[in-house]
Image (cartoon, grey):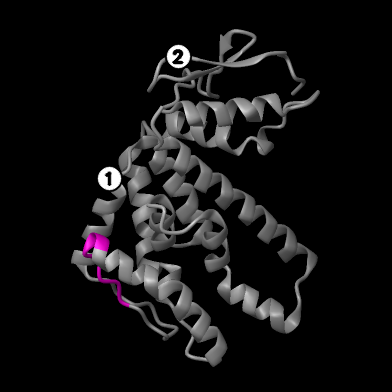
Amino acid sequence: MKRFYRDVEIGGDAGEIQVLLDGCPVRTPAKNPLILPTRALGEAIAAEWREQTETVVPASMGLTRLANSALDTVRLNRDHTIGEIARFTATDLVCYRASDPDDLAARQNVAWQPLVDWVADEFQADLAVTDSLLPVAQSESCLSALRGAIEAFEDFPLTGLHAATAACGSVVLGLALGHGRIDGAAAWEFSLIDESFQIELWGEDEDSTERHAALKRDIAWAAEFLALSRELG
């Protein structure tokens, strides 16, 4: 799409921030007003629109796309979104450990176990961990506690949590990111421990390099969206 505007500004009061293109408020694909919860998020989204050159490339505007999702999808289907996030608990990446080689097992334990312990302390969710290839069943009390932790997120942060959890394959990593226990770079690194270990042994092909770069970008957007959605102002 050809760039159709010259000026990008921020308008509105706290809690109802809008991005204005030549004075006109941006709307979502579903034609909803793009009303943002914080000025910080508004400024970041405005920057994405300013950075567009002769052609507007939506794929380069990760924060805008997440905001659109928050308003067009998550707000209207909140319970469904919570359920999608919670389903990752049954197969959470950090609960499945290697029994060998020792180096890989040690890396997983160093990165993941402190977050498993944090989830237990913070939300009273005692996750079962296994080194078996077979699925491990989580207790109903654990599943309920984690769902409660997810439900505590308002619509915009919930959108970021959904994106982070899906990208990482882990509710634990998503919650840790959402609560500031780790940053986007750590979430990306922790989600790829197994693959990174294999790359060290056998090298990386072009497809993997591109996929890992896309994953890093998506997690970074989710992390920034989570942080900016919860700032005051």
Q: Position of residue 184 (x, y in %)?
A: 54, 54
Circle 1: residue type? Ala
Secondary structure state at the residue bearing disc 1: loop
- Which amino acid type is shown beneath numbered disc 2? Gly
Q: Closest to the observer: 179 or 126?
A: 179
Mark 2 lies on a secondary structure that is loop
Out of 67 and 84, give the one closest to the viewer: 67
Q: Position of residue 94 (x, y in %)?
A: 43, 71
Q: Which residue is mark 2?
A: 12
Mark whose residue sits in front, 1 or 2: 2
- Residue 143: x, y in percent? 25, 62
The residue drawn where x is 38% and y is 77% is 135
- Quick one: label 1, few (<14), some, or many (20+) residues within 10 Å? few
Q: Residue at 71%, 29% (x, y): give it.
A: 51
Q: Is residue 203 left or right of residue 161?
A: right
The residues colored magenta run 122-128
Position of 111 relative to 184 (above/below): below
The image shows residue 152, relative to residue 183, as above or below, that is above
Residue marked by disc 1: 152
Residue 199 shows in the view = yes
Residue shown at 47% from the left, 90% from the top: 99
Residue 120, by quadrant, is bottom left
For the N terminus, the quadrant is: top right
Residue at horizontal 48 percent and vertical 52 percent from the top: 164
